[in-house]
Structure formats: C-alpha cells, structure tokens
Amino acid sequence: MSDRVEKKIELKAPVEKVWSALTDSQKFGEWFRVKLEGPFAVGEAVSGKVLYPGYEHLKFEVVVKAIEPRSLFSYTWHPYAIDPKVDYTQEAPTLVEFRLEPVAEGTMLGVTESGFDKLPSERRLEAFRMNDNGWGQQMKNIEAYLAKAE
Amino acid sequence: MQRRAAKAAVFAALGDETRLMLLARLCGGERLSITQLAEGSALTRQGVTKHLRVMERAKLVRCVREGRESQFEFDPQPVVEMQRYLTLVSEQWDQALVRLKAFVEMSG
C-alpha cells in the first residue's frame, strides 16, 4: 500500500530555468496558480492566496524544508486545506520534493509527495468530498489556462 | 455519513504493519484460516484474530465459516477507494506539471 505520489517529467528547458520557476516564489505562483506573499527560505513558512476562480478564499501555505541549488527543493504543506475556518497546523503535513537532474534535452524533474498515511482520516474524506464537488470546475480552470497559454 | 465512517475505518485499519502483512497474504485471493495466517509469524492465534476483526469491521476482509473453522478472504473494495484518493492527488500533480512545463518551455 503506497502512501506517496511520484511523478517524473522531462522539461525542455535548462536546469537553471526550471530551478528558478520552482524556487522564485513569484514564478512558482504563476504556474501553480497562487499569489505568494514572500520569497522561499529554508525553515520559513510562506503563505499566499489561491488564484483559481471559486477558490480565492483559500489560503495556501508551505514551510520550506530544503533549498539545494539546482538539485532539490522541498516543502511541507497541508493538502486540501479547504476550510478557511479550520486550523490545519496541528495536523501532520505531507512532504513535497522536487528533484532536478540535467539531461541532454533539458531537465528531468521528479516530484514526490509523501506522508499521506499520517493524514487524519477525516481530512482524506474531505478530499474525497472536494473531488466529488469540485473536480469538474478544476478541469475547466486548467483548460482555460492552457487555452490562454497557447 | 455512513460512507465517511466506513472510509475512516479503512484508513485506521491500514495504518498498522501487522495488518498490512496479513492483508498482503490474503491478497493472493485464497481463503486462509486463522491458523494458516498465524503460521510463520510471531503472532498468536488471538493476535491474528484481533487484527482480522479490525479489518473485518473496515470491510477489508470477509469472514467465511467453513464447518467449525473461520476462514478469511480479501474484500478489495475499500482498498480501491483509498487508491482513488492517491489517484486524485496524482492527477492534481499532473495538471500542475503541465502548467510548469508550459511555463518553462514557452517563456523566453
């Protein structure tokens, strides 16, 4: 039984550029669709506003764990922290790690999110609920973004 | 509400190494008795029974009586639902990475 999600994607861009898109909080916000209030720094929390239409009331917050130039960027966060009235900081967060590796075509990026086994079961249920109600809307947001990017 | 309680029980039931080990043995699809499940492990029959009852309440396994002996078999439905959660997270990352790819490959 897996408690993690692992992704690998090849990007046709140099490591330096991918590194900057990940660790410059303004650039990160552009593709992640979040407006961040400050820069990423190891050991520090950065929060911001979600920019998806319909989800603007939500707060986005990460605590940066590692910044190892051009190789590893990691943070912890509370996935699906969807209720602004609930204090999620008491819960075990999940860990997100971005690993970069130069390849002939550009950059191999690996993303791992782990620690789902420690999430309170109630929160996982919330995510199910969110999926049922909100996934269709999410898909439309992404389509709209991609259409604009072309 | 019943559905939620059922899911909570599944996650609790899976959050234990011994139960995962027992479940892995039942995943082969074969019905196994408590004695068979205790074999080759450090667990007593009572220990095995206790863990099986937790998984039975979560509807991960089913108890089937054959004569005087209880046998247990794997019931995959709740595991499928847990997998669905990780699939949801996975899909969200796919979408985010598509946007990242566009961002680093298109901007000058």
Image (cartoon, rainbow, N blue to C red):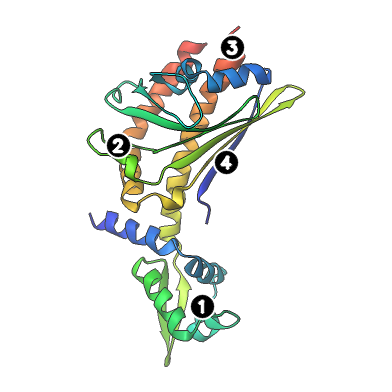
User: A120 above or below B9?
Assistant: above
Q: Chain of mark 3?
A: B
Question: Nearer the observer, disc 1 or disc 3?
Answer: 3
- Per the model, the C-alpha gap separating discs 2 and 4 is 25 Å
Q: Which residue is mark 1?
A: B31
Q: Nearer the viewer, residue A32 or B31?
A: A32
How many numbered discs, if any? 4
Q: Is residue A132 above or below residue B100?
A: below
Q: Sequence-wise, which precedes: disc 1 or disc 3?
A: 1
Q: The residue under label 1 is which amino acid type?
A: Arg
Please, is residue A125 above or below residue B25 in the view? above
Give the chain letter at badge 1.
Answer: B
Task: Name the front one of labels 1 and 4.
Answer: 4
Amino acid type for the residue under numbered disc 2: Asn
Q: Residue furthest bottom?
A: B68
Mark 1 and mark 4: Cα distance apart in space: 33 Å
What is the chain identity of the residue bearing mark 2? Answer: A
Q: Where is residue A36? Give x, y as percent.
A: 40, 20
**Could you give the CA–CA distance between mark 4 and mark 3, rounded to whole angstroms?**
25 Å
Gap between marks 1 and 3 measured at Cα = 56 Å
What residue sits right under mark 3 in the picture?
B106
The residue sitting at 28% across, 54% down in the picture is B4
Q: Write down the residue under mark 4.
A: A6
**Badge 3 amino acid:** Met
What residue appears at the point 51 percent right and 22 percent down from the top-left corner? B99
* Marks 1 & 4 on one chain: no
Circle 3 crowding by C-alpha within 10 Å: few under 14, some 14–19, many from 20: few
Q: Which residue does the numbered mark 2 point to in the structure image?
A: A133
- Res B53 label: none
